[in-house]
Amino acid sequence: MPSSHHPRVSVILPVRNASSTVARAIASVRAQTFSDWELIAVDDGSTDGTREILHELAKVEPRLTLIEQAHAGVAVAANAAIAAARGEWVARMDADDEAMPARLAEQVGFLQAPENRGVGVVGSLVEFGGDCAARAGYALHVDWLNTLLTPEAIVLNRFVESPLANPSAMFRRELVARHGGYRDGDFPEDYELWLRWLDAGVLMAKVPRVLLRWNDPPGRLTRTDARYDAEAFFRVKAEWIARELARVADGRKIFVWGAGRHTRKRAAHLTAHGVRIAGYIDVDVKKTGRGLGGTGVPVIGEGALPEPGEIFVLSYVTTRGARDYNRAKLVARGYGEGRDFFLCA
């Protein structure tokens, strides 16, 4: 963009093969009530006409800068956009989603408010842009995501699932220089970024309004790429759970709530990071009162929970009702969330 003016917000848009949606996504940026922005679109080796669409849009929108690269992946494309960004704030956008007209204005206003000067990342509530019946699991995830508004709620729930919808996020550009940008690997690059920044003490919050329509097309990367399958999420969060345990567990024995095979498999990723599981907790009386599978690792019932401070509990059950049940039982027993237990599904 041949201009000496530095826009206040840089919207970054990594895109690949989104010819059916990218014009709509960009139109939603152009319709913003906040006008002091630049849009940096990085075409990641598209083969379906996306690049041609971007070229045409750049002719009529001087705030749009197009960067072209050979296919290298979304993390590389996002980092290329960040490297070219000139704004104080960086707003993430995806090519199949739509920003509400007040998105940038609301998020800039939030970050500028004196009471929020310590917040580094702000998201928003999101509207599920899909078939709630056919995609019930994703719709439930959106419902859960929209309950996490404050820095405290986000940090306490960060080991359940990604606490922010990536394309809803706006962050202070200086954070990238301080803590690094997106990393490329066999894991969800957005979740890894949030976990790494949260581990570094970056505060995250949300504007309590719907500012993004989060669409769920069949070709979405989260549905087609192994880096976003459930196992990849369990793998990536294990490192950051282990790091947090080293800070807060104070040498206490680690117990996992959930002794079923699938739960044990998820929790087993912790062992690669030096976490030793000393026991399990389960509501199924058939599993309690004996060693697990001949290993000698005990399985206790919820009624046998030690006094708070004796052990540290990781709740690894995945169903939302069970998570709420476990939290309520632990809190009623005097366990403090973040101090004596984490939800880690």
Image (cartoon, rainbow, N blue to C red):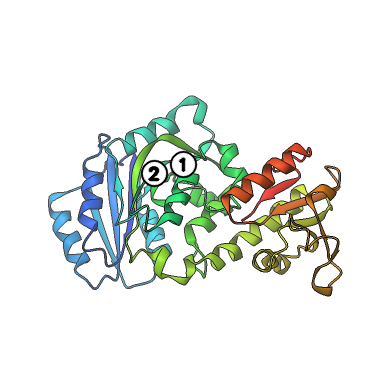
**Dots 2 and 1: beta carbons under 8 Å?**
yes
Could you tell me which residue is drawn at 17 percent across and 65 percent down?
A: 52
Q: Earlier in the sequence, mark 2 or mark 1?
A: 2
Numbered label attached to residue 115: none
x and y percentages locating residue 152 in the rendered image: 60, 37
Q: Residue at x 75, y 49 (%)?
A: 247
Q: Is residue 181 visible?
A: no
Residue 70 occupies quadrant: bottom left
Image mark count: 2
**Where is residue 255 drawn, in percent x and y?**
78, 56
Instruction: Please state which of residues 104 and 174 is positioned toward the viewer in this rendering.
Output: 104
Q: Residues within 10 Å of mark 2 (few under 14, many from 20)?
A: many
Find numbered disc 1 in the image and state the secondary structure of the residue it sits on: loop
Q: Which residue is mark 2?
A: 126
Which numbered circle lies on residue 146? 1
Residue at image coords 87%, 69%: 296
Horizontal placement of 20 versus 252: left or right?
left
Label 2: element kind: strand
Specify whether 160 is left or right of 49.
right
At which x and y percent is residue 252? 84, 52
